[in-house]
Image (spheres, grey):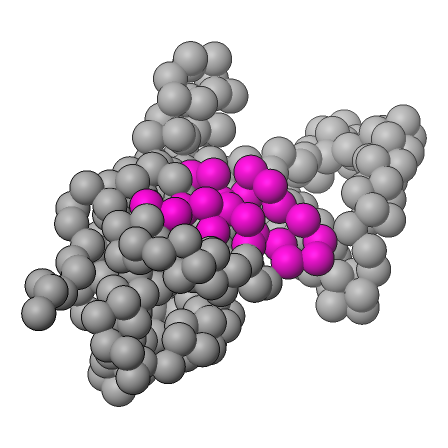
Amino acid sequence: MSSPKKITKKELRQVFWRSFALQGAFNYERMQNLGYAYAMIPVIKKLYDKHDDQVKALNRHLEIFNTTPAISTTIMGISAAMEEQNANDPSFDSNSINAVKASLMGPLAGIGDSLFWGTFRIIAAGVGISLATEGNIFGPLLFLILFNIPHLFIRIAGLRLGYQVGVNSLERIQKEGLMEKIMSITTTIGLVVVGGMVATMLKLTTPLEFDIKGAKVVLQDILDQILPNMLPLIATFVVYGLMKRKVSITKLTLGIIVVGILLHWIGLL
């Protein structure tokens, strides 16, 4: 009786490095499928000796796939564990591999987008931009470091967790309610960071002054006494209200540019 086939750390390391090419051949028909199949090749070659079996496994991973790239290794680890089980168990349903991929990519994309695009990127950009605006060359470097530390950690840990725990990983997360907690925490952090960026990075003041009985009254000083950074806050709520009314980003951007130029030209800003 032949010994069971087992994936080693070598194949998992190869999957990790290949995962960075996930979007290298992105297409609008099946999205990240080519990158996903490319990442799974070391696992397929390790588990299947027959050429036909390798072709079937490769075709499995050419189905449509799309998720946050940094989270993709978790699903790759689960796929690797399921491929290993399929290679050793003749009764295993190979169709379940794609079924699990399809069920995971949506929920994990929601978490990944909130973490990386809605939280880590904003925090890293806020710190980096604050240094860059002061002429500090380390601003862009710090942005890359702050964003990629959690990025690389989650890529590595996700691959290991996905392979070690297998299909049960998502079930455990859902049973313990961790997914809802993660989404709530990341949303709160993201909103706090955005609020801080409005107050510190949106520079919006008015130069208007009034002469009342020989006394010079500066409008900006009055606004600051009522509420510091009032104009940036008002501008933010105006833009938010327009977005709620489904005004396109293109129209908003052009509108902000035109209104800004006009207000500055007439001396209001």
Of residues 92 and 162, the one nearer the viewer is 92
Q: Is residue 30 magenta?
A: yes
Name which residue lies at 83% across and 60% down.
247
Of residues 241 and 89, the one nearer the viewer is 89
Name which residue lies at 38% across and 22% down.
141
Q: Is residue 12 above or below residue 90?
A: above
Q: Position of residue 58 (x, y in %)?
A: 47, 56
Q: Is residue 220 left or right of residue 49?
A: right
Q: Is residue 32 above or below residue 143?
A: below
Task: Inspect this view and state whether residue 190 appears.
Answer: no
Q: Is residue 99 above or below residue 256?
A: below
Q: Position of residue 83 (x, y in %)?
A: 31, 65
Q: What segment is highlighted magenta in the picture?
A: 20-42
Name which residue lies at 27% across and 57% down.
47
Q: Is residue 263 left or right of residue 168?
A: right
| Rendered image quadrant of residue 185 | bottom left
Task: Inspect this view and state whether residue 8 appears.
Answer: yes
Name which residue lies at 26% across and 50% down.
46
